[in-house]
Amino acid sequence: MPRTLWLLIIGMAVNVTGSSFLWPLNTIYIHDHLGKSLSVAGLVLMVNAAASVAGNLIGGSLYDKIGGYRSILLGIIITVMALLGLTLWHGWPAYVVFLTIVGFGSGIVFPSMFAMAGSVWKEGGRKAFNAIYVAQNAGVAIGAALGGLVASYSFQLIFLANTVMYIIFLLIAVFGYRGINTVSGQQTSILQENGMVKNHTKLYALLILCAGYLLCWVGYVQWQSTIAAYTQELNISLKQYSLLWTINGALIVLGQPVISAMVKWFKTLKVQMIAGMVIFIGSFAAAAAAEQFSAFVTAMVILTIGEMLIWPAVPTIANQLAPKGREGFYQGIVNSTATGGRMIGPLLGGILVDLYGISMLFAVLMILFVFAILTTLVYDRKLKESKELAHAS
């Protein structure tokens, strides 16, 4: 790999390590330390996710106009300023304001990081993006573990540690990314992809597929919100809860060879996704029965296996469905769907737990996964019909 890609990998790992100090503990802090309901906590996370969507869209556009280096610096500076504010003022409602700005600033960074990775190692193809993906999960594993350790001493230190990591990321960007050449005008943001897609059948197929993908994310994000708060009621420590995300990130990084062998068993990506969704159901069934930390570890391991089967499959299918020249638009739909799930999930989960209890939440989630399986089963039906008509004619 080129040296410039290694700089991007290191920067991404530092970036995500910093953010992973805080995001697994957001719900716990809002619920237990600020005294707000799970519904309110879900609403705060929803606003944070919405700000990230706006940051992603603007960041992609800025990459086209001013280049990756300046776009990344702008996003990091916004994030660092917000984190400094959060370190000094983390009561209510200042916490919500600064957390929203953090979501916006960090959202600006990600599109440019991925676009630059593709630009500096074009011949690497998927390898460049996979390297960034692995760096993200390494950051999740390290940050979540350190975050739980630091939070067990003081939540005040969590905000400070997050700020320090982003300042390190800023230094890496200032001294490492200035000379990275990016080709302006080749990356297309979602806002620019506003033309009509000729092949509506493929677009409808993707939308049906993404409906199930959305439901999967609504369930998955509960581990960061309602289930996080639930573990505290069971007297599972913050250090132990954060260790669950360390296990998740480590499995994703270290388990790639095993998953590569597993996917060969599945004849199609559809079957692979359905298998992942069935595994998701098993994970939430295990979490529903869990009362000890070891049981939550088991549920997290099962969840991670399902995640590794589903998450990479959806953008791959989108790429296969995309007509030439619309790859960015189709991937934008996929990314927006995932963020939509992260927006809706905490609020829906918080309302369900506040009104009906955690058992009802687990039951509803497993039903949602069944619907996700159904949408995955039928998403390509019209495509098959179109092919059959084409052959018949």
Image (spheres, helix red, strand yellow):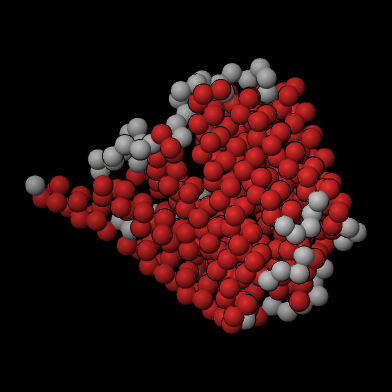
Residue 373 in picture, x, y percent from top left: 42, 66
**Quarter of the view holding residue 152:** bottom right
Residue 344 located left or right of residue 388: right
Q: Height in image: 324 above or below 294?
A: above
Establish if 341 lies above or below 134: below
Q: Nearer the viewer, residue 138 or 235?
A: 235
Residue at horizontal 38%, vertical 36%? Answer: 193
The extreme right residue here reads 153
**Residue 349, quarter of picture:** bottom right
Is residue 321 or residue 127 the one in the foreground? 321
Q: Nearer the viewer, residue 240 or 270?
A: 240
Q: Residue at x 69, y 55 (%)?
A: 96
Question: Relative to residue 228, is residue 304 drawn left or right?
Answer: left
Q: Return the residue found at the far front.
A: 93
Can residue 164 be seen here? The reply is: yes
Image check: 227 left or right of 261? right
